[in-house]
Amino acid sequence: MPLNKPTICVLGCGTMGIAIIRGTLDSMTGSTSVQSSSKISHATTATSTTAVKSAEEDELLLPAGFIACVSHQESATKLEKALGDQVKVLHGIAGNVQGVSEADVILLCTKPQVAKAVLSAPGIQEALKDKLLVSICAGVTIEQLQSWTTPTTTVIRAMPNTPCKIREGMTVLSCGPNTDEQSMRFTSNIFSTLGRCRILDEKHLDAVTALAGSGPAFACVMLEALADGGVMMGLPRDVATELAAQVLQGAARMVLMTGAHPAAIKDSVTTPGGCTIAGLLTMEDGKIRSTLARTIQEAATVASTLGRDKK
Ligand SMILES: NC(=O)C1=CN([C@@H]2O[C@H](COP(=O)(O)OP(=O)(O)OC[C@H]3O[C@@H](n4cnc5c(N)ncnc54)[C@H](OP(=O)(O)O)[C@@H]3O)[C@@H](O)[C@H]2O)C=CC1
Ligand SMILES: O=C(O)[C@@H]1CCC=N1
């Protein structure tokens, strides 16, 4: 599918739609203060001719503009204020048809429960012909998406997360059997500018939804609980929150940047007879490992049901 500076229609522009648009616009203007790890590694390798050519080609794959579609007039007004004149905002059923018709790529970001109705509405299938549809709806399969569109619509599933807004996201992509290389390249290019991006088989997407999609919520509960401990021991709330957030970021970056096993990092902190092992044993008494692992298991189980019709 030829894609050259395409216009993207975000169909259902709420929390995630805004995160993706905001992150992409920031990446295009270079106005973010947060440099993602994937950007750093890209910059250090972009010295060969092939890399420069590839960077130029990737530039052509960047969007020319965004159209954002929502259901309600009030949401449209809020969105216009939040995103300014860089984005064309439409609302209602007619807005969806207009948005999809005017775009080259459609990013489906509605709740999973309304995806079928939105794609089956009059005029949408026609407008989707020969276009790329990227769905971020949890639990909605490629097979379902294909059955709700025409055979000439290319379908890709993506599972991003909210840190895409600050270009620290984690996205996993899965494609259908007939996905062409340029569609895949365009989609991975967009999500790579919003953080890290991987391509995996669709069978992994419910686990990915639980771990990476829902993960920021689980991580923030852990962060808040660590900060609570600091507050219990007399730290001011803002200091405790800053310390907890920087500790989680620092530990996570050590894993990502050095490739060290988390257990090795834990062991390097743990002095024999010291305070860390005292804290670690308390965590084990509270079954924190199985609680967190079961959290992912349960979220993945529920994710697998989200695309199903409610009886
Ligand atoms: N939130 C997250 O962290 C993540 C969510 N996801 C997936 O992303 C999707 C969106 O989630 P999220 O952004 O949280 O949801 P939100 O509720 O924040 O956004 C949904 C958007 O869809 C719009 N909408 C509803 N009905 C229609 C319609 N008929 N036509 C056009 N737009 C419509 C809503 O408009 P209005 O406000 O006017 O009702 C709203 O803007 C879900 O499928 C979820 O599974 C994936 C990864 C992470
Ligand atoms: O809670 C949900 O269903 C969505 C999917 C992943 C994150 N939020």
Image: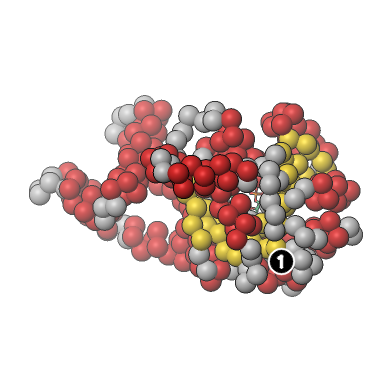
Residue type highlighted by circle 1: Leu
Q: Is residue 244 above or below residue 94?
A: above
Residue corresponding to mark 1: 145
Quarter where residue 62 is shown: top right
What secondary structure is found at the residue carrying circle 1?
A: helix
* Ligand 1 has an atom within 8 Å of the beta carbon of the residue at disc 1: no
- Count the numbered circles shown: 1
Q: Position of residue 140 (x, y in %)?
A: 66, 65
Q: Tell me the crowding category of disc 1: few under 14, some 14 to 19, or many 20 or more residues within 10 angstroms, Cα based.
A: many
Say above or below: 60 vs 134. Answer: above
Residue furthest front in the image: 49
The x, y position of residue 291, in whole percent, is 39, 61
Indicate the position of residue 197 as horizontal and vertical percent values: 50, 53
| Position of the N terminus by quadrant | bottom right
Decide if residue 118 is on the left or right side of residue 286. right
Residue 88 screen position, x and y as percent: 78, 36
Q: Nearer the viewer, residue 248 or 311?
A: 248
Which residue is depicted at the point 18% across and 52% down?
267
Q: Is residue 301 visible?
A: no
